Amino acid sequence: MSRLKMSADQTTSTLSSPDILKLKYYLINTVSRELEGTDISFDERKKFALERLDDIYKRANLKLPDDIRKHVFKEVGDELFGFGPIQTLLDDSNVSEVMVNGPKNIYVEKNGKLMKTSVKFEDNDHVRRIIERIIAPLGRRIDEDSPTVDARLPDGSRVNAIILPIAIDGPSITIRKFAEDRLTVANLIDFGSVTENMSEFLRACVAARLNIIISGGTGSGKTTLLNVLSGFIPADERIVTIEDAAELQLQQDHVVRLETKPPNADGRGEVTIRNLVKNSLRMRPDRIIVGEVRGGEALDMLQAMNTGHDGSLATVHSNSPRDAISRLETLVLMAGMDLPINVVRQQVASAVDLIVQQTRLSDGSRKVVAISEVAGMEGNTIVLSDIFKFKQTGIGENNKILGETEPTGLRPMFAPRLEAAGFKLGADVFGANISEMLAANRSSKRRR
């Protein structure tokens, strides 16, 4: 170990010096060998490893400054029991997403902004080892024949990984971090994502068992909004959730969580979203929540909505309420049923009551920019009526988007359903000014 000895001047120059890296790998390899064959629990293994790490370091007779020694020990611990170089990013509460584009290009979304980090993996094999560590406990696999995988971390964070030959520049990992604290509607109001009037309206719509589609692009906050809206479901109802990778955080007690299953090595045993939607109908659900509709399950979901399973919630990838309608039509056709387009549109129009459009704006903020009623059919066209619509008023400091999602003044056709459920929303919720309405009414009488 003499070749690992170094002066304080050397060690303080850089944490990525060859000597520091050599020490780190020596500690990792030595502790790993001593852990081999130990039949103890994960927590006991971690405690044992930290004790052995300190002993090995002392035996090496090194005198590193405390800050560097602690940093090296943390990196060794992250490599042995965490997710290697990106563990520090995952521990940062301000980081919402981690994106590994090959071993040397690692980005994060922090406070709504994308930025490149100084974190690096050694090489492609190093990234691959971390991917294997993520998916191994879940019984999932990734190889050249099946080069993509969706998984989740123990804390619920969502993970997508992709390797060669599909990932040309090296293995890629995308981690959408799981929020430790469940956001409430009050949080969304504080963030400016919704207004109090909108939250009051959405609460009534969920309680009145309207079928709601949350529409938005990748990373726009659809799942967060779905979580918040699910909190308005009464506690005495049975809820079945269906997701690719379970990440919803429902607070009710009576919840059945279903998750898809990929095929095994023989290509058998796959359980899809569509399988789960069909099965959920036999589970006596009061509510069905689909994390994301992106295939033929759209048809089964719409049929469920049309046959007594009202109050359902789902998300779909699209950039506007009108696009969401088109997207649903396309997904229904993916079910393999040879349905005429007018029949598909009638299914959508009769099943869906409301589309909530969530958007990630150019300044990184996330906002509900439209709430639209599906108001039926006119000829062969589905009619949408905007109840709330975002109006941008300008751009402030640091390119912050200024504006608010305001009521349009239209009262939805389903307003009687809200009143029947006990929600008599005032005219101000929908943007109607009572004094102006009375003045207009008096003026109309005078003209007559």
Image (tube, rainbow, N blue to C red):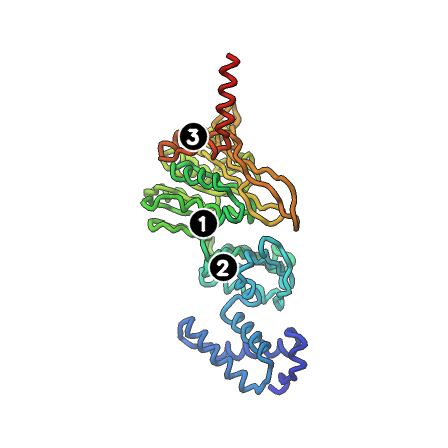
Q: What residue type is labelled 3?
A: Phe
Q: Which amino acid does label 2 sit on?
A: Arg
Q: Nearer the viewer, residue 371 or 22?
A: 371
Q: Where is residue 434 in the image (x, y as percent from the top left)?
A: 48, 28
Q: Is residue 47 visible?
A: yes
Q: Position of residue 199 (x, y in %)?
A: 46, 41
State the separation of the CA atoms marked 3 and 2: 47 Å
Q: Which of 393 and 375 is in front in this view?
A: 393
Instruction: Please tell me whether mark 3 or mark 2 is closer to you in this view.
Output: 3
Mark 1, residue position: 184
Q: Nearer the viewer, residue 90 or 349?
A: 90
Q: Examine the rendered structure and indicate whether residue 149 appears above or below residue 220.
A: below
Q: Which amino acid does label 1 sit on?
A: Thr
Indicate which disc, 2 or 1, sits on the residue closer to the N terminus: 2
The local secondary structure at tag 2 comes to: loop
Instruction: Please tell me whether mark 2 or mark 1 is closer to you in this view.
Output: 1
Indicate which disc, 3 or 1, sits on the residue closer to the N terminus: 1
Mark 2, residue position: 141
Q: Which residue is drawn at 46% across and 48% down?
A: 186
In the picture, residue 79 is in which quadrant? bottom right
Q: Residues within 10 Å of mark 1 (few under 14, many from 20)?
A: some
